[in-house]
Amino acid sequence: MMKDNTNKRMEMNCNLCPRNCGVNRACGQIGVCGQTDRLRVARAALHFWEEPCISGEMGSGAVFFSGCSLHCVYCQNSSIAKGGVGKEISVSRLAEKFLELQAQGANNINLVTAGHFVMQVIAALEQAKAEGLRIPVVYNTSSYEHVETLRRLEGYVDIYLPDFKYMDEALAERYSHAKDYPAVAKAAIAEMVRQTGPVRLREETGLAERGTIVRHLVLPGHTEDSQKILFYLHQTYGDDIYVSIMNQYTPLAPLREYPELNRRLTEAEYDAVVDYAIEIGIENGFIQEGETAKESFIPSFDCEGI
């Protein structure tokens, strides 16, 4: 029988994400994600600011991984996305953390931006499941993912929580330096829905136990692109997915090169997107009310729980 060396090849010449930087992270080279293959986590604790069917009353067991391959100019988690914040841990310690979060009453294990550590995460999940992990696993992602990488997660992830950031390639290039983002995100989300099927909620609690919930953060001045995204999602998936329309865009630092983003979203802009969603028939989803666009909703990445 021929031995499958795919995992080794991916480690030697990393192509886990669409950047395909090809560096040898196993030998200490740093990828576009800002990381070697040494597992780094910035926070692992109960998190109460996800969608109601994810956080519930007890919270989501969110594990925030250091680094990111997308590098959005307005990133709300920039301190960890750039890769400078976090603590190096072993796969075994990650598995232990999953079990600790379960013991604390977490509704699920929420893997936030884990794509560049997907092989280590799979190993940790295998260990944790063998030792009694039974709550659902959520994969929280920008959707800038290779389908081949997502296929490795089949059977390990119960709920996908992807973003759909842009439909316009020019916006994707300007704000995330990824002109291919729309096509990549479409393919990635299709794979997620294939794996999970329609959203399934527990009748007694309303908590998600399986499915795909697509998030969209409305950017100031770009409601038309938001509407195109919602139209695509509804036409493609109907009621099989839930859509979460977010108003929490927060300019955390002066965006001198992007003055159009250097303000918060107006109520009128957000209402226009929500009204459009209702108009085209989207029924399954979430909207945000009140003043969610503030820094207090962004957790401190101080290695809590690591």
Image (cartoon, rainbow, N blue to C red):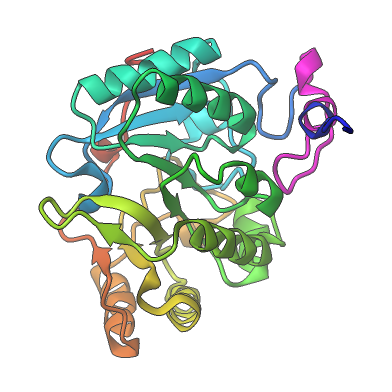
Horizontally, residue 305 falls left or right of residue 147, namely: left
Magenta range is 10-29
Which quadrant of the view contains residue 279?
bottom left
Residue 240, image x, y percentages: 38, 71
Q: Position of residue 123 (x, y in %)?
A: 56, 23
Between 298 and 8, the residue placed more toward the observer is 8
The residue lying toward the viewer, choosing from 4 and 90, is 4
Point out residue 69 in the picture as x, y percentages from the top left corner.
64, 40
**In this view, 73 is above or below 30:** below
Q: Is 257 on the left or on the right of 99, as rendered?
A: right
Q: Quadrant of residue 130?
A: top left
Image point (20%, 35%), residue name: 59
Does residue 246 show up? no
| Residue under the point 70% across and 43% down | 17
From the viewer's perspective, is residue 202 above or below residue 112?
below
Identify the residue at horizontal 41%, vertical 47% (top origin). Answer: 158
